[in-house]
Amino acid sequence: MAQKPSTYSPCMQIIHWLSAFLILLMLLIGLIMVRMNPSPTQNVLFRVHITSGMLVLALTIVRLGCRAMIPVPDVPSGITGYRKILFHGIHILQYITIIILIVTGVGILKNSGLSLFSPDLTPQAINTDLQGAKIHSVLSKLLALITIIHIVGGLDYQFRHEDVLSRMGINWFKK
């Protein structure tokens, strides 16, 4: 049996950091655009939010495919018991939440009579009374919380136990 790698493949590292950037961008844009008055800037932010969502979906599909084909490192040493369950659970919950957010986002557009390429695609054209819009709103906050837990957990382990950032291509702390 082949030994597991100590780091994720360069492909998985790139997908991870691109996805992280896009997800943080989408969360930030989402927070800003829903608090803005209707304007051309709000429309641009809305389109960037939607485009980023489609890119995250594509990256997530590629990432899941890569995970199925390319060996990934074991859970970092020292993570046992409930922390190991939390480690896996957070990652699985991230994937599920991302996919449902994108599905509800597309569903909101469709049920509002819009498509990704509608010329009249603006926040005002969205039917915010749809159940999908409410689910999307709640899940966006859940994704923000999961993302914070993921970042804090990784940094806590990085600085209190061992170098885990090098698994994702950040070798700044390698001893």
Image (cartoon, grey):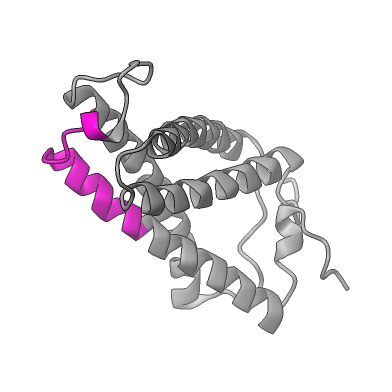
Nearer to us in this view, 106 or 89? 106
Which residues, given as a range, are shown in magenta? Answer: 124-142
Nearer to us in this view, 56 or 92? 56
* Residue 78 visible to an observer of this rendering: no
Identify the residue at image location x=60%, y=69%: 154
Q: Position of residue 156 (x, y in %)?
A: 61, 78
Q: Position of residue 2 (x, y in %)?
A: 74, 46
* Main secondary structure found in the magenta portion: helix
Q: Position of residue 103 (x, y in %)?
A: 31, 34
Identify the residue at image location x=63%, y=40%: 15
Nearer to us in this view, 167 or 119? 119
Residue 77 appears in which quarter of the rendering? bottom right
Residue 16 is left or right of residue 5, and the answer is left
Residue 31 is left or right of residue 6, and the answer is left
Q: Position of residue 94 (x, y in %)?
A: 43, 52
Above or below, comparing residue 164 to residue 40 in the picture: below
User: How many numbered marks, from 0 up?
Assistant: 0
- Quadrant for the C terminus in the image: bottom right
Residue 140 colored in magenta in the image: yes
Work out which residue is located at the far right of the displayed protein and give it: 175
Above or below, comparing residue 51 to residue 131 in the picture: above
Residue 133 is left or right of residue 117, and the answer is left
Above or below, comparing residue 120 to residue 40 in the picture: above
* Residue 157 visible to an observer of this rendering: yes
Residue 95 colored in magenta in the image: no
